[in-house]
Image (cartoon, coloured by chain):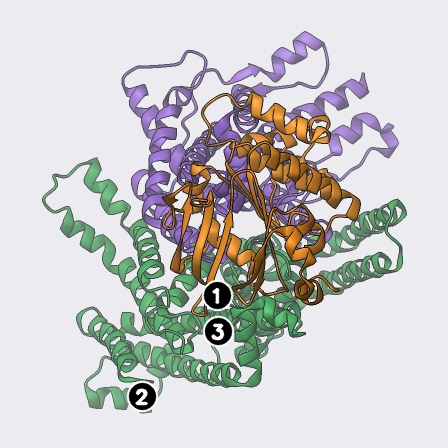
Chain colours: A purple, B orange, C green
Amino acid sequence: MDILNALVTFLNFVVVPATAYGAQLALGALGATLVYGILRFSNFAQGDTMAFGTMITILMTWWLQSLGVSFGPLPTALLALPVGIAVTALFLLMTDRVVYRFYRAQRAAPTILVIVSLGVMFVMNGLTRIIIGAEEQNFADGARFLITAGEFKTWSGLDEGLAIRASQAITVVTAIIVVAWLFWFLNKTRTGKSMRAFSDNEDLALLSGINPDHVVRITWIIVAALATIAGVLYGLDKSFKPFTYFQLLLPIFAAAVVGGLGNPLGAIAGGFVVAYSEVLVTYAWKKVLGYLLPADLAPDSLVQLLSTDYKLAVSFIILIIVLLFMPTGLFKGKSG
Amino acid sequence: MGQPFLIGDQMTGGYGAADILHGCTIAVEKGEIAVIVGPNGAGKSTAMKAVFGMLKLRGGSVRLDGEDITTLSPQDRVAKGMGFVPQTSNIFTSMTVQENLEMGAFLRRDNIKDTMAQVYDLFPILKEKRNQPAGELSGGQRQQVAVGRALMTKPKVLMLDEPTAGVSPIVMDELFDRIIEVARSGISILMVEQNARQALEIADKGYVLVQGANRFTDTGRALMEDPEVRRSFLGG
Amino acid sequence: MNTRNLILFALVGVLYIATGMFQSWNLALNILNIGLLSAIMALGVNMQWGFAGLFNTGIMGFAALGGLAVVLVSAPPEPGGWAMGGWGILTGLAFGAAVIAFATWLYRRLGKGPVRTLVLFAVLGGGYFAYRAILDPATAAVESFNPAVAGNIGGLGLPSLLAWPLGGVMAAIAAWAIGKIALGLRSDYLAIATLGIAEIIIVVMKSEDWLARGVKNMIGLPRPWPVPYEVDLQQTPAFLEWAANWGFDPAAASSILVKLVYALLFGTILLGVIWLSEKALNSPWGRMMRSIRDNEVAAEAMGKDVTRRHLQVFVIGSAVIGFAGAMMTSMDGQLTPGTYNPLRFTFLIWVMVIVGGSGNNWGAVLGGLLIGWLWLIVESLGPGVMQMLTLGLGEGPLKAHLIESAPHMRLLTLGVILLLVLRFSPRGLIPEK
């Protein structure tokens, strides 16, 4: 019984939240890694693209709510999501047209493009804050739990409860659908294959008659979709605040680098590596150990490797380990 | 005899201010093999790239089947029926062999099944490894993928930039056999080679370039027999 | 300096004078001081970017380390807190460093393989728990001592000026560690890694209360020599007489005088840094750095150790930033980790460097003074301007929202400026010679 209780506690406080967070990071890192693979720079505006897309979705959600529209037990934000993606895609395409295209034509160095993306970051960050403000927003509605701790306890008869919030379930389901679609697109469609070819060997792709402008356009649209979905899921699960989204840049890049920059499969693995490490390291193991160890050995302290303040440090340490020991990442991205 | 099928006529030009090519002429007839040889830095690859439109010409012209294509971009030349195999980075390493071939046929909207079957007939090992990432193949197999990729557009002319660089002599012989086979199917071959002797053996026509200009032009056999060519360029 | 550059500087000067005349001299000098400090940081960034093409996004962290140095050096000692666990903390930190050194040594000694991985894992894992076992009781003891006003180990009570070089040294050490890891890899990796280290430094400063009281902030840090205190001035007969002679209000005059002294102090240091930097730029070393930047492959082929040179310039540039960060905390008289924000401390400095002219020291200074002015003047004028712009609008939520969001305008403005400069004048206002 104690082992079951320990397991449920572990599932409840580690596996469930880390899986949801990992899925959100994976989607964000996929966006960053696609930009890196196709456009060949680290996009510092990735976090703010997520914030921008989420903001549009929130505004749309509020409007739908004011009309009395609802999505039953699902959050209204999911109805608003397509609009958020469309507006963000338009914004990114426009940014590419007026900003990035110029540097691409010049074949500018990646570092220049990173600085340019800083400028874009400022603009998107400013726009988001001007439109919706810098404060925290909660926009989740619909059912709150798939299963509550109390329901689980009565069902299982255990002392410990397992709660799965609706937002966590939605996150995982959505992420699976999106990732499955993305891999189908990249591996099975002509356009998707041409994107991979372009990322692999730009000159040969051009020789083969692949239209770079088309590839870049499709990339931005997909990046807008991934960023908006990742942002909305994160916002539903936690809350929306522009600065928090900016700070997601570090875990997102850590995830992308762990997996190997430019490698989509790696980005997904990296997202979960970072999320699980973060939760495992900042989780207080006292309760789990209390069930597993005999009473006289049970720990008095929290048994927490790092306080939750140091969440960001976990991403950073992972990043450092990867840079030190395997700069191309787990899945051999475009190397250093 | 009328116009050659493909000709880079009196080409002059280079990458920067200084010209590398000086009135250099390269031509190939339908279904024949033309080989460009010469010492290092003679502008062999540059001449080939000029024919393919990868550098701007200050003088001369390029004509394909009688049509002036001097101002076309490389991509447009591909659409006109020219296939090009670069010397390095000539495959998509992260994609499977089959996907490499599919990307070669990217511009085609018709059914590519038959062409792919032909490529697999020509290079049976590729069929065996069609679902492997091309980057995992051996050097000779990679070159086969590269040639196969270029053949997927059903080109009328295939241009090869040092296809045997870095492969073993056995693989080289095999590759040359395949190239002859391609030529027999009616595709003109224009190729730059370091291994001058072996290349001239299979060549219908040979060009010896020195400092960006034609030094000797003749059939492959005649060049092989020319004592001066032997002494200066074929090592006796 | 040619005429064009002098005119540019004169124009920026006019901005400051106009601010003094139409708003207040107090504000103008305040902006000037922050502009001068930003200019020094911009010089540090310019060494890294302009001379070597290194993209550092951790400016905030290096500046914050400088601030921490000020607390450690100049804050009054806290003997009570120190007695509770000061030595324990030092032991813990030393032990942690020893574990890392031992692990590094093992890593070099042992051959690659599962044995090495396991041993390293055991050493680092065991070391971490032991480190926490030593450190945690000590920090808890320090933090429990008089937490309302102290709860930290206190400083050395030495003059603030001494803290500035220490700030540089601390930033240099952090830069060395991060540079050692991230330099020599893809250029983007340095950007990502420095972004990370900056966040971590701030998190440490926020959460480790024993160090500098964390988010409870350190206040009342002493001023650097020779800056006087307003209160003292107002009680000095000579000053009062002087003010009366000129017809100044003593309170206002003392405040302005203090800021003027700061401006002189900072200005002198700025000139010193420029002088050194110009010397370096025009020395054989500087020419080599630029040749490496312009063609890394060729430089490497000529036998230059590119990564090592990059590490050198990265450490020096970061030290300058740390130095300036210490100066800033000295001037503020307080360390408030919560106010360190990457947009303000890292990316704003970048805008200064790019707008001013990367690779040119005077450009970096001009950028610092100009963008610093713009950033702060918009802060003080923004709401007013927004009021005026929305005058025609009826009172309502939209108007309230717009006025409220005025401060965010400057992010947008800066982004647009950065993009415009990069696009149309990538070499900046004062281009590299």
From mark 1 to mark 2, how far is it between C-alphas? 27 Å
Residue A32 visible in the snapshot: no
From mark 3 to mark 2, how far is it between C-alphas? 26 Å
**Tag in front: 1 or 3:** 3
**Tag in front: 1 or 2:** 1
Find disc 3 in the rendering and name its residue: C327
Question: The disc labelled 2 sits on which kind of residue?
Answer: Phe
Q: Chain of mark 2?
A: C
Q: Residues within 10 Å of mark 1 (few under 14, many from 20)?
A: some
Q: Position of residue C217 (x, y in %)?
A: 51, 59
Identify the mark at residue C239; answer none if there is no mark.
2
Q: Are marks 1 and 3 in contact (CB under 8 Å)?
A: no
- At mark 2, the secondary structure is helix
Question: The disc labelled 3 sits on which kind of residue?
Answer: Met
Residue C262 visible in the snapshot: yes
**Pick the front one: C210 or B183:** B183
First of labels 1, 2 by sequence position: 2
From mark 1 to mark 3, how far is it between C-alphas? 11 Å
